[in-house]
Amino acid sequence: QVQLVESGGGLVQPGGSLRLSCAASGRISGIGTMGWYRQAPGKQREMVATIRNTGITNYADSVKGRFTISRDNAKNTEYLQMNSLAPEDTAVYYCHAAVRAREYWGQGTQVTVSS
């Protein structure tokens, strides 16, 4: 079993920054692509950014140039640096990992962008 624990969410003003972290533990040998997804009230969950274990990244158009995903393979941790946050970025952010052809999700962390 694999556990993903997120941290770093909170309330921030428009234009501000937050950094999310996600630590993986358990049977994590063979961990592959990791990513961040988000779900706003009344909307479907959407991909924000993904990063392969090779370091190749992919971003949703809405966050390109503002968000940066990274990972520390030695610590089995991924990060999401979010800059220039806007109210439309308000959502619950979920960590995701693919491990040996199975998918795992974190419990989610709330990000609220409001003045």
Image: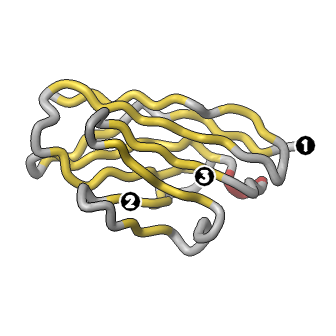
Most extreme residue toward the front is 74
Query: What residue type is disc 1 on?
Result: Ser
Q: Between label 3 and label 1, give the one nearer the viewer.
A: 1
What residue is disc 2 on? 50
Q: Quadrant of the N terminus?
A: top left
Query: Would residue 11 appear left or right of 13 to someone viewing this image?
Result: left
Residue drawn at the location 62% of the way across and 46% of the way down: 91
Residue on which the image places disc 1: 115
Any mark on residue 42, and which? 3
Local secondary structure at mark 3: loop
> SS of the residue at dot 1?
loop
Q: Residue 22: x percent and y percent? A: 41, 35
- Amino acid type shown at disc 3: Gly
Q: Residue at x 35, y 42 (%)?
A: 72
Q: Mark 2 packing: few (<14 Cα in 10 Å), some, or many (20+)?
A: many
Q: Secondary structure at mark 2?
A: strand
Q: Residues within 10 Å of mark 1 (few under 14, many from 20)?
A: few
**Rendered location of residue 7, percent (x, y):** 52, 29
The answer for how far apart the CA atoms under marks 3 and 1 are is: 22 Å
Mark found first going from the N terminus, 3 or 1? 3
In depth, the one of 47 and 40 nearer the eye is 47
